[in-house]
Amino acid sequence: MIDVLASNESPAHRMMRRLDELVKFSDEDGALTRLYLSKAHREAAKQFIAWCAEAGVDAKIDASGNVWGRYEGKAPGAPALMLGSHIDTVRNAGRYDGNLGALAALAVVEALAASGERLDHAVEIVAFGDEEGVRFPTTLTGSRALAGLFARAALDQKDADGVTMRDALVAFGCDPDGVGALRGRNIAAFVELHIEQGPVLEAENLAVGVVTAINGATRLHAKVVGLAGHSGAVPMGLRRDALTAAAEMMLLIEARARIEDDLVGTVGRVDVEPGAVNVIPGEVRFTVDIRAPRDEQRRRAVSDISKRLSAIAATRNVELTLTQTHEAGAYACHASVIAGLKDSVERVYGAPARLLPSGAGHDTMVMGQLCPAGMLFLRCKGGISHNPEESITTEDAEVGLTSLIDFTRHFQAGPKRAT
Ligand code: GLV
Ligand code: MN
Ligand code: MN
């Protein structure tokens, strides 16, 4: 084993190398797909624990599948600054979304451990297991568990193969009954380093930015039931085609989202039954994801869309069932964390910090219900994310990491900063 604390490799280079190494833990050959509680997730978690051990941190998998470790401060049991992000991915993902923040947390602790430096506060590292919500209908399971917000009913949700979250947790080696009892104790603040996933920093030629707020999101599951029939024998006027009805619904969602600034609506997955060239589709299921920076704006859009989809279903004589699978309110990052990150970026980068909102959802929005929370964004090439083309530079990673280390050193757990 290399003694990482004594190695000459720079922290940013080591983090980038590990990001490349984590790619091999995938549920799919030739692509990065690491779903919550899958074999690849288990292997990535084990690798993460092994890297924590090299830094002298005894990390463990908690009841919900998060990896969680603690680097003590000067006095054992001191309040903690928690750093981290998620290690699950979307299908055919890029390697930086989530993984960057989890490995950056570890790199911060390594930087302290290399010289035996102890702070007034502890530093906790977390690699959340489910932020993407790709496997089960629900999302942000890891941070919800840690924030004490896990809804027990989620244990009965099933993945596409009919496996419940409860059974998947047991297969992963976790205790489903323990998830609801998890809650981070004595956590003074949570900070997440993440790629921007948008084009603003690149357009302004900036390596990093400080996040002010995170969009709220609602996810729905739509089921449209018509009548399967012979594609040659049933005249057009007598059909109850579930797919053409769903297509009209999808265009309505797009049109509704387009009429308001900042509102976005996406249909990301469609399943068609029976799915044969000569059969009129009898059933279509699709997902809807609606986001906005203002909760009231998002709720109004969801209500409008629901009504208009029902009207389309009635006109086309199909049945529509809409089920809400996720809702997260917009989160305004904590003023003390924003101020601390801004100071750090300015010390490290030598220029006024760019403040910007996040269109994507993040674990920070849930952790913000437990403690003051905030985020640092890193420029990503072309603003591309949720795509294997995701790309960052080692130079930018170094600015991000150095700012996070600086923030950690200057952090004060008391009322002055983080309440
Ligand atoms: C996670 O990446 C999300 O915003 O859906
Ligand atoms: Mn992410
Ligand atoms: Mn993501």
Image (spheres, grey):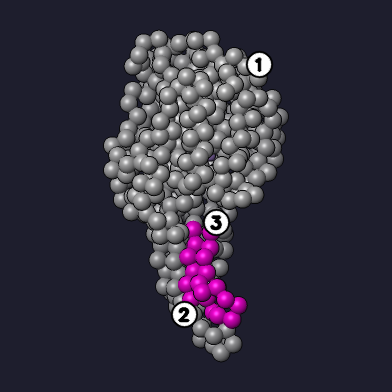
> Which residue, given by chain and number where applicable, does mark 1 sit on?
8
Structural crowding at the residue carrying mark 1, measured as other residues with C-alpha within 10 Å and reported as few (<14), some (14–19) or many (≥20): few
Residue at left offset 51%, top offset 20%: 55
Between the C-alphas of marks 2 and 3, the distance is 24 Å
Amino acid type of the residue that numbered disc 1 sits on in the rendered structure: Asn
Residue at left offset 61%, top offset 50%: 29
The residue lying toward the viewer, choosing from 376 and 308, is 376
Q: Is residue 240 visible?
A: no
The yes-or-no answer for disc 1 within 8 Å of ligand 2 is: no
Give SS at disc 1: loop
The image quadrant that residue 151 belongs to is: top left
In magenta stretch: residue 274 = yes
Amino acid type of the residue that numbered disc 2 sits on in the rendered structure: Leu
The residue lying toward the viewer, choosing from 238 and 103, is 103
Q: Position of residue 258 (x, y in %)?
A: 58, 54
Amino acid type of the residue that numbered disc 3 sits on in the rendered structure: Gly
> Which residue, given by chain and number where applicable, does mark 2 sit on?
227
The image quadrant that residue 60 belongs to is: top left
Q: Residue furthest bottom?
A: 233
Does the residue at mark 2 contact the one at mark 3 (Cβ under 8 Å)?
Answer: no
> Which residue, given by chain and number where applicable, does mark 3 sit on?
268
